[in-house]
Amino acid sequence: MSDTPFLLAPAQLEDAAALALDRAKISGAADATAEVIESTQLSVGVRLGEIETLQHRRSKQLRISVIVDGRRAESMTSELTPDAIESAIEAACAIARHVAPDESAGLVDAAFLARDIPDLDLFHIWLPSAEDALEIARRIETAALDGEDLPAGTAIKAEGARASAFHRQLCFATSRGFMASYPSSSHYYDCGVIAERNGRMQVANWSRTARAIDDLPAPDTIGRAARARALAKLDARDIPTGDMPILFEGILAMALVDPVMGAISGEAQYLSDGFYTGKLGERIFADHVSIEERPLLPRGLASRAFDAEGVATVDRDLVHRGVLQSYALSRYSAQRLGLPLTGHAGGMSNLRLVGHNTRPSDTREAMLRKLGNGLLVTDIAGGGTERTTGDCSFAVTGQRVVNGEIAHAVEGVTIAGSLPDLMREIVAIGADEHVEQSITSGSILVGAMRVAGR
Amino acid sequence: MTPSNSQVETGLLTANNLDRSHLDTILGGVMTRSIDYADLYFQARRREVWRLNEGQINTGSHSFRQGVGLRAIAGEHAALSYSDDISLAALASAADTTRAVGHAGRSARIALGNTGRSEASDGQIALYPMADPLGQSTADERVNLLKRVDALARAADPRVSQVTVMLQIEQNHVFIARSDGARNADARPLVRLDITVFAEQNGRKARAHVGDGGRMAFEELTRERVQAQVRKAVDRALRQLDARAAPSGPMTVVLGPRETGILLHEAVGHGLEGDFLRKGSSAFAGLVGQRVAAKGVTVVDDGMIAGSHGSLTIDDEGQPTERTPLIEDGILTGFLHDLHNAHLLGTRSTGNGRRESYAAMPIPRMTNTFMLGGSHDPAEIIGSVASGLYVAGVGGGQVDITNGRFVFQATDAYLIENGRLTAPVKGATLVGSGPETLKHIAMIGNDLAIDGGSGMCGKAGQNVPVGVGQPTVRIDGMTVGGTA
């Protein structure tokens, strides 16, 4: 097996990007950006000890964005031949002719582009053979199926275990002279387990992702975690309708933070559409809570030295001690709002929900005691937050907690409230921090929400 | 083959210096003793998207993606290798990697495929126009449609503060070559119009979204059809301005017709997909022949509804789509199958083998899933409820197939008080249990309508267009997740 996961040399990506920018200029696009990506993936899934799926994936694409007389258009092609690039640019320029000119459209000035791009340690090659990956997936599944003795009448079934190796290289270039490329990797283990008792099944999944295979926990821990979570859901029942405090597991933080990020986006500001419009400098969270953004974290799953427009990223607190410090802006929204660039084209990087009152003793057990009588939410099965108003309603599963102790599993209920109110009234953040993709958070204790059950 | 089908084949094979004999060679090479079945899925998809924001066409995009996926099946095992280069070298390399699945543990050899006609698309009834919707209209016509939507919405009511419109037009060519010799082509158009209306009054803000479209010609987005969609979006946004908090707890729910069919998609559809059945992970496994819904409830999956988003002349394994009864008069009767799971279960494909693209494995999926109409007048159904919730519009839904717990969001709803619709309420999540909730259907309306315009369904990371449908139904005792 070769020692690179890629078929294209980095120079070939750069040549394709450069060619695209040249052709765009000839076609009348004064400004253009080109992004070329190649990615490869090997994933192996097992069920009951045997291969269920074996997938080899390799894809590449060029995305070109042109600005012709203030008119923006984009084009994407999976073919990188000069002819295909030419057609893609023609298509983009043809569309641009029908787009309205927009004085805020444009490229980032050279002064704000990332220079001295740091190495964020994002690329760690792992090229397992199909047999190697199969063996790992088997170990994950074995740990899920062969755990400690089960209570009478309880069965564990395999839903499937998977191991995946993913590598990507990206080149981004603009007609203002920016060109940068870097490779990255992202490997994962994943397991689904079904627990069954009295003819009722409950499924749980557990997965871990890391830039380097050495940063992933031992495969059997994945299987054990999925097993424990499925068993914990057995004998779930609904509970009476009423108001009670809610403790969200840290793994669910994104469900609460993602709508917040949407509401502080530049688009929500200039369209005046969102529950945090015009709130810059105001208190939007409890005063003991901050949201840190750390784009330059080595090996971070959402780390990046520059955003999707080439703007250098910087560490910042988006929310500091409850006060909104910054919107999340692209060049376009910054221009519209007359605000400085923030490096958020293409979204957020690594986020961490920080509780300033959190002590090391605020373990999961301590958080359950703080919850007292309420609901621990472990899964969000559906629902969401209305973008304009922030009203939220989720279908959840979890555990009924009485006097700080888990009483029984809960399913078939919803929780509802106002997300901005909940964020202002966060009671505590646990020390039981969990990293889930781009967000790190301990468990989150909020005030009363309406629980709808029987 | 129809001329159009041979054009699809030419575009995918000949244009890339391939012919059928190359495919025979590649498939023959994959079909070693340990491999039961293999197929090649060639695809080229061209898509154009236009966006209007703040009264202006503010951007547009074009994309072209093509590639080929090679799948091999050995017993319960499946391998997929794909490339976005369509070339003999790429096919040979894919063949090398997929053959590996045959070495990894074996079960008895099974015969897959050869269940449909070898040229399934020959003489199929045309469910959608073969002509390319991207070639049927000019950029000016597309842009004018977006501007017309914007103008109509703004003219409809002074409280409309903002409008965003997205138009997506796609042509998707596929050619499927199977190891049993079947060769099928399909040209699949897709048109989609998304309208979001923002309304504002006395500092209160609200928004509403509607989507329309299908596998159809661009011209089918007629003036009247677009006008009706705009009206719907405006009305919903205005209602949300006045909405009060939604109620919470168990109550009688009346689902209006059409898009509320998401109930069936989540509550029963997914649980009847053959892969979950084979693994025994569905709450419906073992319930065939048993009552899972009230008398009078008949649910089908029908991939042959002309023009619908979820329809396919052939599925992604080359099988003609069908009308599959799932629940008949309340009794569970059918499941949805692709080739692989059907054969492992000793049954036949129902034409529900679908894949998002050449880069994804085919799995059993729904097409258009709906409940047949009953005998009640919708007004009579509403009139029968002393206190409850009426749901006219819905957002997304999910289901946990192992226990049938499903959820969907009501985005346009009213209180029912003493048999009449009264105050509009805010969005809320509704939850229930698949094998239980349908038993509590008390009345079925005579107003079946199918929403073939905009549904997308996600499963195992793959998104495919689907249709849903339902008449007005009354369900006693659903849990509504509001705050009041």
Image: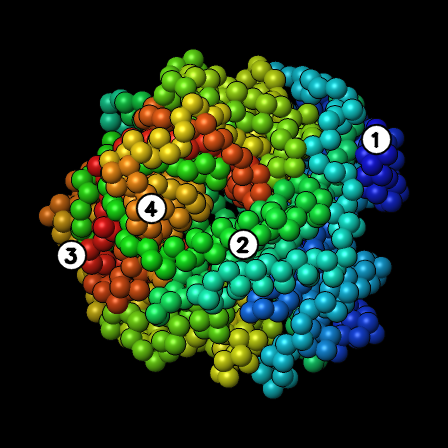
Whether residue B174 is visible here, answered yes or no, is: no
Residue type at the position of mark 4: Tyr
Q: Chain of mark 1?
A: B
Mark 1 neighbour density, 10 Å: few (under 14) some (14–19) many (20 or more): few
Location of residue B302 in the rendering, given as x and y in whole percent from the top left corner = 58, 27
Rounded to the nearest whole Å, what is the CA distance between mark 1 and mark 4?
A: 50 Å
- Circle 1 sits on which residue? B2
Mark 2 neighbour density, 10 Å: few (under 14) some (14–19) many (20 or more): many
Q: Secondary structure at mark 1?
A: loop
Q: Secondary structure at mark 3?
A: helix
Instruction: Look at the picture and state if A321 lies above or below B187.
Output: below
| Of marks 1 and 4, the one in the foreground | 4
- Circle 2 sits on which residue? B230
| Callouts 2 and 1 in the same chain | yes
Residue shown at the point (55%, 49%) measured from the top left: B228
Tags 3 and 1 touching, CB below 8 Å: no
Q: Earlier in the sequence, mark 1 or mark 4?
A: 1
